[in-house]
């Protein structure tokens, strides 16, 4: 008998479909060993030796594995193909050695759970990769040292119950820094001007005299010739006044890169109105038509980061939700391993995709040679594959029937991206049309001419010349867009030609205000973490989840805001540990961990180099003053002592208490109103949370009214969604149950 050990029961069940008699497959249920919860668990005096111990809840599992290992011919360690999976295999081997000789342990690695992949892995068994294990131990030790040393400081200097993490603190800093950049952003008003033109009406005359004649025949320059279709009406945007561009761009230096602020030089309502009035007196004609054909190439298949970003953009999934769905898809054998930063795909998979496309759509839909994509990340694990379907013939409908709609949606996203990556380029014809607006002879006011050209900052006159532009595109050949539901939409322009005269139908001056840098959402934060070299593919979701669970951030319409506690924690860490709580340091540590994984560095010297100055800094910071967490007043008075009621953030979220705590211990639930009435009974719609902390919108009159929805748009539109099971919800955030410090 051969014993195969994996992490999860689902994975064990799927593998069991491909292995016949003679194999026993068991799940370790994740890690079997870990650092102790109540103590540091790292011997800083003896080369940072980690004190791993068997997890209490895994003792029965280990007992069963030991029993099976005693009679096993060989123990096959088949955990996931990454550092964490390698460490799990190493721990399993360590705890089972008493029951079996070390040479009886073999490590098998596969990136998809299919019959072919399993059989191939069995033909090439190896040993646990000690370098990968060392890298995982180094990360675990480093994070434990930071967390267990900084967290007590936060208790002392900020508030009891807080904690810090090496990578999570940098993610929090990104969100806090962005919020402050938004606060200090100076908004400016500006206007854009669009004209609605129809034509072509006639050829642009060669002289002022013929212009006048054409105008007289039409009745006025604004006359609309008969017989023109609605499709001949086009919006053109004002881009120049007297040959001077009106768009200006300012680049702001942010903590995380640059942000471009775009506006126009039309900075007042008065100026916009003058231009709007002057445009009524102009003659409009086509100055230039530029057409060109361009190729649009498909994007590479997904990595962990890009999958999480697109799932957030397309479906609003959090990183945690995406990874949970992907984990199930992987374990059920539908996709390749989902924790990866590689863009490679197996040659056999590429061949199968090309064959599928050729048979389904025709040979012109595949390029002459297979596509290969270069990894931008220097640390990408080339031995891994990108995320792709294991079988190209399996569609989302089958996945949906087996697992459910959300799994089907994510699978379709993965399938489309992978298959499209091996399809032909799309061919697009782009058209840019430039329109010039010159003074009409009917409206020239003699004697008002000025010597020299005017600028768009001077008073608008009858002699001012304007330039407008519009663009369109037509898909000439679909290529990879054939299977992409998010492809291009045609914007076909009329058959314009240079010198065509156009009719003015409408002038629209629209006011705008420059917008500050946007708050992070799941997609943009994951992108910044990846670009900054912070964390690894497998950690993005947990990074966000951790700071959200700690109440350091909250979501507002799917965007992240720092809470008052998060701001206080961040400010304390930045002030006292700026060298650690920063992008360059964290990225450098990731590079060193990668070097350990590649066998280029030993992990203990790396930890020592970090820990010695860190320990010294800890001693210095213990002497600093305590940080006060600002609170928000509600405007209400305490019914016990008349003090101000304030909003605080505790372990279970926001709650209301008396500002005179601890003298007064009054508390009550915090109810966050949306300002919208309930579509069912007119009550107040408030934000509630499920037992897992997911926010939704419900009626304040519950249980008399059971209205509930996940989407605020449903409330705004008065939509009553299908009834769902909300029995496991909480009315509002539970008040803090521990003492405030």
Image (tube, rainbow, N blue to C red):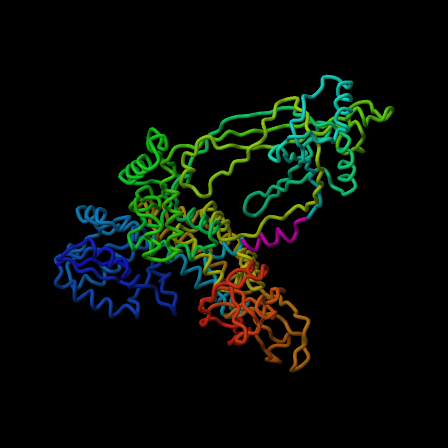
Across and down, in percent, residue 332 comes to: 29, 55
Image quadrant assignment for residue 258: top right
Whether residue 383 appears in this view of the structure is yes
Residue at 38% x, 36% y: name it. Answer: 374
What residue span does the magenta drawing correspond to? Answer: 175-186
Q: x, y percentage for residue 17?
A: 21, 55
Task: Name the residue at 39% across, 32% down.
Answer: 424
Q: Which of 484 and 362 is in front in this view?
A: 362
Q: Closer to the camera, 528 or 557?
A: 557
Q: Is the magenta stretch mostly helix, strand or loop?
A: helix
Q: Is residue 558 above or below residue 550?
A: above
If the image is split into quadrants, where does the C terminus sit?
A: bottom right
Q: Is 581 placed above or below 353 here?
A: below
- Is residue 374 placed above or below 49 in the rendered structure? above
Q: Position of residue 541 (x, y in %)?
A: 43, 55
Q: In this view, does 665 lie above or below 378?
A: below
Residue sitting farthest toward the right: 447
In this rendering, the count of numbered labels is 0
712 on left or right of 369: right
Is-magenta flag for residue 504? no
From the viewer's perspective, is 556 left or right of 505? left
Q: State the quadrant of the N terminus.
A: bottom left
Whether residue 156 is visible to the viewer of this picture, yes or no, is no
Please tell me whether residue 182 belongs to the stretch shown in magenta: yes
Lateral position of residue 533 relative to residue 637, left or right: left
Q: Where is residue 151 in the image (x, y as percent from the top left)?
A: 47, 65
Q: In which quarter of the image is residue 166?
A: bottom left
């Amino acid at each position: 008998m051969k014993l195969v050990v994996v992490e999860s029961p689902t994975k064990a069940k799927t593998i069991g479909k491909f292995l016949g008699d003679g194999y026993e497959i068991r799940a370790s249920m994740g890690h079997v060993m870990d650092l102790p919860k109540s103590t540091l668990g790292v011997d800083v005096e003896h080369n940072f030796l980690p004190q791993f111990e068997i997890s209490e809840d895994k003792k029965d599992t280990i007992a069963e594995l030991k029993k099976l290992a005693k009679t096993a011919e060989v123990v096959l360690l088949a955990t996931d193909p990454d550092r964490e999976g390698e460490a799990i295999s190493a721990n399993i081997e360590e705890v089972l050695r008493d029951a079996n000789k070390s040479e009886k342990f073999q490590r098998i690695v596969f990136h998809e759970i299919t019959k072919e992949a399993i059989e191939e892995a069995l033909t090439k068994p190896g040993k646990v990769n000690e370098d990968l294990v060392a890298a995982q131990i180094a990360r675990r030790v480093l994070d434990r040292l930071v967390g267990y040393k900084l967290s007590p400081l936060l208790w002392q200097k900020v508030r009891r119950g807080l904690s810090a993490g090496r990578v999570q603190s940098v993610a929090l800093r990104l969100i806090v820094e962005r919020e402050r950049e938004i606060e200090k952003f100076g908004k400016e008003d500006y206007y854009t001007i669009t004209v609605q033109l129809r034509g072509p009406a006639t050829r642009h005359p060669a002289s002022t005299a013929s212009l006048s004649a054409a105008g007289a025949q039409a009745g006025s320059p604004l006359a609309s010739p008969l017989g023109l279709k609605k499709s001949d009406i086009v919006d053109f945007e004002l881009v120049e006044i007297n040959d001077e561009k009106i768009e200006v761009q300012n680049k702001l230096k942010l903590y995380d890169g640059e942000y471009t602020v775009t506006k126009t030089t039309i900075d007042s309502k008065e100026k916009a109105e003058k231009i709007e009035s002057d445009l009524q007196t102009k003659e409009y004609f086509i100055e230039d038509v530029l057409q060109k054909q361009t190729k649009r190439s498909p994007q590479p298949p997904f990595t962990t980061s890009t999958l999480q970003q697109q799932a957030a953009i397309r479906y609003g999934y959090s990183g945690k939700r995406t990874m949970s769905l992907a984990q199930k898809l992987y374990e059920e054998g539908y996709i390749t391993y989902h924790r990866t930063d590689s863009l490679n795909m197996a040659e056999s998979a590429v061949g199968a995709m090309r064959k599928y496309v050729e048979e389904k759509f025709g040979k012109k839909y595949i390029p002459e040679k297979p596509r290969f994509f270069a990894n931008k990340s220097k640390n990408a694990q080339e031995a891994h594959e990108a995320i792709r379907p294991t079988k190209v013939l399996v569609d989302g409908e089958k996945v949906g029937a087996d697992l459910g709609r959300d799994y089907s949606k994510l699978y379709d996203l993965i399938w489309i991206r992978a298959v499209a990556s091996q399809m032909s380029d799309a061919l697009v014809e782009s058209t840019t049309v430039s329109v010039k607006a010159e003074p009409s002879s009917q409206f020239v006011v003699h004697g008002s001419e000025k010597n020299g050209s005017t600028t768009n900052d001077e008073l608008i006159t009858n002699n001012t010349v304007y330039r407008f532009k519009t663009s369109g595109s037509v898909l000439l050949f679909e290529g990879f867009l054939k299977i992409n539901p998010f492809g291009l939409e045609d914007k076909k322009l009329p058959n314009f030609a240079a010198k065509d005269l156009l009719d003015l139908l409408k002038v629209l001056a629209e006011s705008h205000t420059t917008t500050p840098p946007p708050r992070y959402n799941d997609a943009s934060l994951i992108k910044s973490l990846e670009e900054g070299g912070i964390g690894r593919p497998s950690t993005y979701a947990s990074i966000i989840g951790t700071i959200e669970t700690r109440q350091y951030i909250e979501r507002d319409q799917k965007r992240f805001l720092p809470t008052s506690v998060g701001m206080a924690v961040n400010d304390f860490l930045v002030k006292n540990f700026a060298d650690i709580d920063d992008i360059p340091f964290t990225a450098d540590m990731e590079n060193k961990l990668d070097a350990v994984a590649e066998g280029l560095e030993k992990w203990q010297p790396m930890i020592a180099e970090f820990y010695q100055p860190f320990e010294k800094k800890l001693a210095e910071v213990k002497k600093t003053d305590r940080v006060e967490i600002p609170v928000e007043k509600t405007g209400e008075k305490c019914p016990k002592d008349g003090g101000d009621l304030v909003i605080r953030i505790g372990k279970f979220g926001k709650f209301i208490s008396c500002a005179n705590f601890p003298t007064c211990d009054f508390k009550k639930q915090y109810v966050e109103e949306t300002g919208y009435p309930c579509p069912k009974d007119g009550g107040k719609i408030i934000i509630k949370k499920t037992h897992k902390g997911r926010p939704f919108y419900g009626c304040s009159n519950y249980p008399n009214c059971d209205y509930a929805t996940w989407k605020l748009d449903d409330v705004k539109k008065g939509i009553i969604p299908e009834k769902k099971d909300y029995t496991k919800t909480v009315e509002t955030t539970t008040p803090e149950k521990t003492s405030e410090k």
